[in-house]
Image: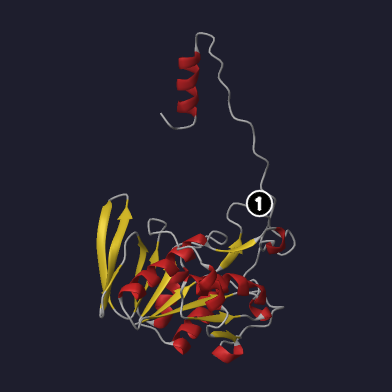
């Protein structure tokens, strides 16, 4: 079994994030860079299967700047077998379609039985990339899974919605995405960190994947406007002067809660 896990380096989830007001892109220099937590869970899902099935190969794949090496190494230190890193300055600011094209090309080149991804990155929040990759690969997709079961020939899991819990399944090869209901990623050990330095780490660019990148001067999309997040306003404070209940009820009605 060969499992490819899509990972991404993002600005620290718990830190302050800002946009570059000129480009509309995340100001990545303004916050510490970390491996996205949902991707740690995706790596853990792959490793949990590998722990129980000898001979399983877990390949982590990312598209990002050369500086993302530290985050990729963390996934290797967790236990992944090898890494593929697509680093190309011409891909900076790539939209979802181009990103999916590049990742799909890298997955085809690497080979796979199963692709596991997080359902939603904490910086972009598009939530559609796993489905787009599956479409480009021409394989089945199971998205937003809260549980994951993999056999030699199929994959299945639970998808929770407002209507209930659905049990979905597909034959391999397939692409799945998981939610934060899945177990957290395991801690890295000193032994794992040292071993990660010796594991296969392949760096590619768009040309090597056969992906044509349009002239960077010609925009694939247009940013209409970008602005700083407005400062948090103070909330409504109700002081009980004998009519607090009525004022609270009126406030809830005005907010559409009651």
Write the residue at 36% across / 75% down.
50
Q: Quadrant of residue 149?
A: bottom left
Foreground residue, 93 or 57? 57
Q: Quadrant of the C terminus?
A: top left
**Seen from this angle, which residue lies furthest front?**
191
Name the side, left or right, on which 17 lies relative to 124: right
Residue 199: percent from the left, percent from the top? 53, 83
Q: Quadrant of residue 94?
A: bottom right
The answer to whether 157 is drawn above or below residue 17 in the figure is below
Q: Residue at x 48, y 21 (%)?
A: 248
Under circle 1, the secondary element is loop
Residue at screen point 51% across, 66% down: 188
Asked whether residue 239 appears in the rendered view, the answer is yes
Looking at the picture, tell me which residue is in the foreground, 33 or 108: 33
Seen in the picture, residue 175 relative to 184 is either above or below; the reply is below
Residue 96 is at least partly visible in this image: no
Quadrant (top left/top right/bottom left/bottom right) for the N terminus: bottom left
In the foreground, 213 or 56: 56
Residue to which mark 1 is pinned: 16
């Amino acid at each position: 079994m060969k499992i490819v896990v899509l990972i991404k380096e993002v600005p620290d989830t718990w830190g302050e994030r800002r946009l570059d007001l000129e480009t509309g892109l995340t100001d990545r220099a303004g916050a510490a860079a970390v491996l996205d937590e949902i991707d740690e869970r995706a790596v853990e899902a792959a490793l949990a299967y590998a722990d129980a099935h000898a001979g399983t190969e877990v390949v982590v794949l990312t598209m990002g700047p050369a500086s993302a090496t530290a985050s990729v190494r963390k996934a290797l230190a967790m236990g992944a077998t090898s890494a593929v890193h697509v680093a190309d300055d011409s891909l900076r600011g790539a939209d979802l379609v181009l990103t999916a094209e590049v990742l799909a090309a890298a997955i085809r080149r690497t080979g796979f039985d199963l692709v596991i991804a997080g359902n939603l990155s904490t910086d972009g929040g598009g939530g559609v990339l796993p489905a787009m990759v599956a479409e480009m690969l021409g394989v089945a997709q199971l998205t937003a899974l809260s549980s994951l079961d993999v056999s030699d020939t199929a994959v299945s899991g639970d998808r929770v919605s407002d209507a209930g819990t659905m049990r979905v399944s597909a034959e391999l090869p397939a692409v799945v995405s998981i939610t934060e209901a899945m177990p957290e990623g395991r801690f890295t050990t000193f032994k794992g960190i040292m071993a990660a330095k010796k594991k296969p780490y392949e760096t590619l660019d768009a040309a090597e994947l056969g992906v044509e990148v349009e002239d960077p001067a010609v925009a694939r999309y247009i940013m209409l406007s970008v602005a700083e997040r407005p400062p948090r306003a103070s909330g409504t404070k109700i002081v009980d002067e004998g009519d607090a209940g009525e004022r609270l009820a009126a406030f809830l009605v005005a907010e559409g809660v009651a």
